[in-house]
Amino acid sequence: MSGSDPKSAVVPHLKLQLVSLDVLQALSVSNADSAPNDRQSSGLAASVSDVAPPEVVVTSCAPLGDGEVTAADLGGRLTADLGIDLARRLRRADATGKPGEVVTVDLEDDTTETLLVLGLGDGSVESCRTAGAKLASHIERASVVLCDVTAAMSHAELAAFCEGLLLASYRFSRKSVASRERKVTVQLAVAGKLSARKVLNRVTTTVQAVSLARDLGNRPSNEKNPQWLAQLAVKTGKANGLRVRVIDEAGLRKGKFGGLLAVGAGSSQPPRLIVMDYRGEPTAPKVVLVGKGITFDSGGLSLKPADGMPLMKTDMSGAGTVLATMSALRDLGVTANVTAVLACAENMPSGSAYRPGDVVRHYGGRTSEVLNTDAEGRMVLADALAYANARLRPDVIVDLATLTGAATLGLSRQYGALFSDDAGLAARLVAAGQESADKVWRLPLVPEYRAALDSEIADISHVSRENIGGGAITAALFLEEFVGNRRWAHLDIAGPARAEKASGDKTRGATGFGVRLLLRWLQDAPELW
Ligand code: BES
Ligand code: MN
Ligand code: ZN
C-alpha cells in the first residue's frame, strides 16, 4: 500500500521562529522613521538583521475588569507612531479581550500592514491555547507574522499557545491538486531564546505525535488495514528507538487469540496484534497501553446503517493514539517503561464473517457469546487485555477505544469517558486531561449491571441481554473481566476521537484525542500515578 510517511506531513506550511524581545524595540524604531533604510543604520540593526520584517504584528489585549480592555505595549507604540488611537479602535470594535478574540487594525504602513489585537482573557494556559488556535485562521494569508503576545508568557502558557496555533493549522487532504497554502513564518517574541527553544522542541514533538494520530484516523480505509498499521508501527519504532513485534494471522492462531481472529474473519485483510516496547529507566514502573485498531467498522453481519458508516474509518483511533504516543516517548525523555498493544482488525460482513450467536474463545481461554457483530471492539480488546495481563505483567494498564455510541450520547464530543476502580489512577488521568485539553469524565463501573452480561452457554455474553441502557458502562464491565487484578483504566473515546467541526485546536475529522493526555500523564513523576 502506497502513501507517504505520515510523520513528514506535520503542519508543513507553518514555521515557528524565536526572536528576542529587543527586536520589537527595533521594529518600533523603524516604523517611527518609516524609512526602511534607516533600520540598517539604527543601533538595533544587528538584532533584526537575521529576521524578516513582518507584515502582520500580533499584540495582545486583555480585559481590565470594568468593561474596558487594554492592549499591550507594542500595539500602542506601533499605532501611536502612525497616529492611530488604538484604545478608541478597540472600543469601537466592542473588544472584550476574551480568549481568541481578534480585532484587525489596518496600519497602511509599508512594512507592517496589519496589527492583530488578540484577546488573551485571563492569560491562563487554557486561554493561551484558545488564543493560539483562533489566531491560526487569521494569519493564513500572511508570510511573516510577529507575535509580541508571547513575550510575557510563562513556559506552560507559551507551550499551550504554540500547540494551539500548530494543531489548529493541521490539514489533511487527498485532493489531486494540492491547495496552494502559503508558507507562514511566525516569529515569537520571547525573553530567553535558549529556554524557549527547549519548550518549542517539546511542543513540536507533541504536535507531531498528535498530527500522526490525526493522519492515521483521517486516512481512508482503502489506504489502511491491519498489515499497513503493522508496517507503520515497525517504521515508527525504528525511527524512535522502540522494539516492535507483530503477531500475524498464523501467530494469532497459535496463540489462540479468538477475539481478533473472529472479528477479522470476514475481511480479506487479516488481523494483527502489534506490540511496541519503549524502555525507560530499568527501575521505573511498567505501563501497558492498549488500543482498539478496527481499520474499518462496517458492523459486520450486524451491518451498520449507511449514514454513520463513513466515519468508521476512524475506528482505529485508540490504536492510532497509542502508536502516536509511543513515537514521542524517547524525545520527551519519559522514564516509565511503556508497552503498546494494538489490536487491529477490519470488521466486514462476508461468507467467512463471525456470526451473532457464535461463541468465541479469547486469549487465555475465556469464552464469550457474540450477540451483535457490531460490538467488535470489546472482542479484540478482550484478547489484548488478557495478553497484557498474562504476559506483560504491567503495573498499570490503560486502554483507549472508540468503543460505544453510548459514550457519545452521554458526554457528546468534548469529553472522553473514563472508567477505573482505582480512584488515584482516575484522578491522575482526569488531571492530565484537564491540563492537556484532552478532557475526560469519570463514569462508574456499576457492579449491579454486570448481571446483564450473564450468558447461559459461555463465560460472558459480549453485550447486554436485557436492554438496561448504560451501553458504555456494560462495555467497560465486559473489558474488566480480562484485566485480572491489574490497576486498569479504560477510556471510551468514541465521542472526542473525531469532530464534525473544528473547535479550539481540534480540527474537523480525526482529532488525535488522547495523545496529549497520555503524554502529559506519562511525563508526570510515576510515583504520582
Ligand atoms: N465503533 C463503534 C462505536 C462508535 C459508534 C464509535 C459511533 C464512534 C461513533 C462500535 O464498534 C460499535 O459499533 N458499538 C456498538 C455496540 C452495540 C452493538 C452494543 C454501539 O455503540 O452501537
Ligand atoms: Mn462496531
Ligand atoms: Zn467499532
Image: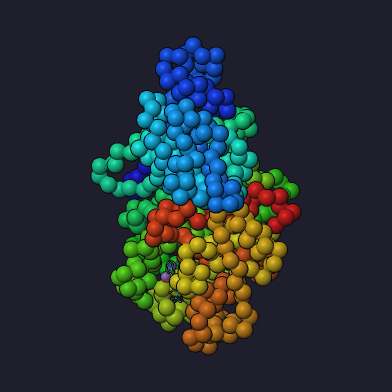
- Residue 438: x %, y % from top left: 54, 56
Identify the residue at the far top of this view.
41
Residue sitting at x 41%, y 80%: 356
- Residue 5: x %, y % from top left: 41, 42
Residue sitting at x 32%, y 56%: 222
Number of on-image labels: 0
Q: How is the image coloured?
A: rainbow
Residue sitting at x 37%, y 25%: 110
Above or below, comparing residue 486 to residue 436 in the picture = below
- Residue 340: x %, y % from top left: 56, 54
Is residue 255 visible to the viewer in this orientation of the structure? Answer: no
The answer to whether 149 appears left or right of 2 in the picture is right
Above or below, comparing residue 232 to residue 295 in the picture = above
Judge by depth and name the residue closer to the eye, 414 or 232.
Answer: 414
- Residue 55: x %, y % from top left: 40, 30
Judge by depth and name the residue closer to the eye, 269 or 165.
Answer: 165
Is residue 351 visible to the viewer in this orientation of the structure? Answer: yes
- The quarter of the image that holds ligand 2 is bottom left
Judge by depth and name the residue closer to the eye, 374 or 350.
Answer: 374
Residue sitting at x 60%, y 61%: 398
Task: Work out which quarter of the rendered image holds the C terminus and state it.
Answer: bottom right
Judge by depth and name the residue closer to the eye, 460 or 419.
Answer: 419
Above or below, comparing residue 296 to residue 26 in the picture = below
